């Protein structure tokens, strides 16, 4: 059954690529614990033409933002950005400790293996927007892909 589900999800992802000008790979969301109000979504994006990721939404969160993490005088800082440039043919990785999508004001805990719906909004050079819907699997807090930079207490001063 799990193989059928994975094959179906892979087919959906390929279908999204066929209909979209942006290839979305390895999308996932960090699972949460009870009472946790925020988590991150991560993926690799490759645009066919110069494009920008200008928005993300999800029914599991009250607020969804594109964020950047960076080091400033030895202090890790995080801030929302209005968009993320995707140069033609170059893969941009949204990952822990770098650019990522923040899901805040979570409506419920995100359980491991839960499929989290995300809608990404891309804007081409002409200003035309395209929405791509996908479901990203949640991974446990201790999954190997995690860097530990966004654990359960990941709020970094956000007032939401």
Image (cartoon, helix red, strand yellow):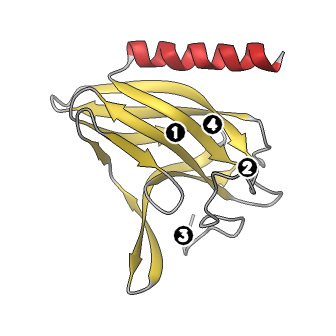
In the figure, is residue 37 to the left or right of 160? Answer: right
Quadrant of residue 92 within the rendered picture:
top left
In the figure, is residue 58 to the left or right of 17? Answer: right
- Compared with 148, 77 (above or below) is below
Q: Indicate which label's residue lies in the foreground, 1 or 2.
A: 2
Q: Which residue is mark 2?
A: 31
Callout 1 secondary element: strand
Q: Earlier in the sequence, mark 1 or mark 3?
A: 1
Label ID, residue 59: 4
Callout 4 secondary element: loop
Q: Which residue is mark 3?
A: 158
- Compared with 73, 122 (above or below) is above
Q: Earlier in the sequence, mark 2 or mark 4?
A: 2
- Locate residue 44, reporting x and y percent: 45, 39
* Label 1 crowd bin: few (<14), some (14–19), many (20+), radius 10 Å: some
Q: CA distance from mark 1 to mark 3?
A: 18 Å
Q: Indicate which label's residue lies in the foreground, 3 or 2.
A: 2
| Image marks 4 and 3: residues in contact by CB distance under 8 Å | no
Q: Earlier in the sequence, mark 3 or mark 2?
A: 2
């Amino acid at each position: 059954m799990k193989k059928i589900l994975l094959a179906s999800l892979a087919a959906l992802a390929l279908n999204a690529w066929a209909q979209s000008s942006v290839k979305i790979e390895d999308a996932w969301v960090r699972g949460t614990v009870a009472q946790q109000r925020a988590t991150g979504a991560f993926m690799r994006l490759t645009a066919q033409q110069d494009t920008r990721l200008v928005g993300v939404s999800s029914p599991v969160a009250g607020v969804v933002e594109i964020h950047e993490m960076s080091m400033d005088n030895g202090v890790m800082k995080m801030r929302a950005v209005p968009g993320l440039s995707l140069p033609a043919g170059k893969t941009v990785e949204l990952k822990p400790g770098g650019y990522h999508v923040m899901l805040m004001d979570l409506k419920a805990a995100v359980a491991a293996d839960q499929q989290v719906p995300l809608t990404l909004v891309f804007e081409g050079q002409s200003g035309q927007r395209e929405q791509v819907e996908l479901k990203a699997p949640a991974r446990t807090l201790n999954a190997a892909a995690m860097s530990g930079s966004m654990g359960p207490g990941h709020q970094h001063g956000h007032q939401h």
